[in-house]
Image (cartoon, helix red, strand yellow):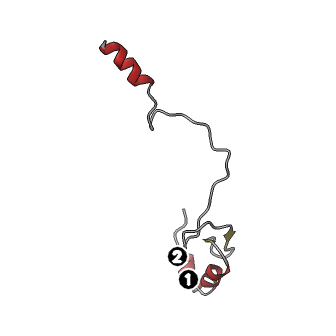
Amino acid sequence: MDVDRLEEEEDTPTYTSLEASPSLVPPRYYCDTAGLEAPYTDPRTGLRYHDKSVYDLFKNLVRPLSSRVVRP
């Protein structure tokens, strides 16, 4: 009986045993300051932003400060 039980446990999917193909859904990007979905990217800094109010904040950043932001 223990052999049957071990075989069942091996067939049970877990988070580490599941294999899946890459997602067909495009990745979501989030605003670096607000945490909301970010459809836009600041061309100067490469930071993603949600709307014009956040972009205005990025425009007011001092250039050396914005260049020190760590990007993945």
- Asked which secondary structure carries label 1, the reply is helix
Residue pictured at 62% horizontal, 58% vertical: 28
Residue at 39 percent of width and 18 percent of height: 7
Q: Position of residue 32 (x, y in %)?
A: 56, 70
- Residue 33: percent from left, percent from top: 54, 74
Viewer-proximal residue, 37 or 21? 37
Q: Which residue is mark 2?
A: 68
When the figure is inspected, residue 8 is found, relative to residue 26, above or below; the finding is above
* Type of amino acid under label 1: Pro
Residue under the point 33% across and 13% down = 3
For label 2, count other residues whose C-alpha is less than 10 Å away and answer few (under 14), some (14-19) or many (20+): few
For the view shown, which residue lies furthest in the left direction?
2
Name the spot of residue 29 as percent of width and height, x first.
61, 62
Q: Residue at x 63, y 44 (%)?
A: 23
Quadrant for the N terminus, please. Answer: top left
9 relative to 38, above or below: above
Q: Which mark is residue 64?
A: 1
Report if the CB atoms under discs 1 and 2 are less than 8 Å apart.
yes
Q: Which SS class for mark 2? A: loop
Whole-percent x, y for residue 61 in the image = 58, 85
Q: Is residue 24 left or right of residue 19?
A: right
Q: Amino acid at mark 2?
A: Arg
* CA–CA distance in space, label 1 to label 2: 6 Å
Q: Rate crowding at label 1 as few (under 14), some (14 to 19) or many (20 or more) other CA atoms within 10 Å.
A: few
Q: Quadrant of residue 22?
A: top right
Quadrant of image for the C terminus: bottom right
Residue in front for this viewpoint, 32 or 46: 32
The image quarter containing residue 19 is top right
Residue placed most toward the observer, 5 or 16: 5
* Residue 8: mark: none
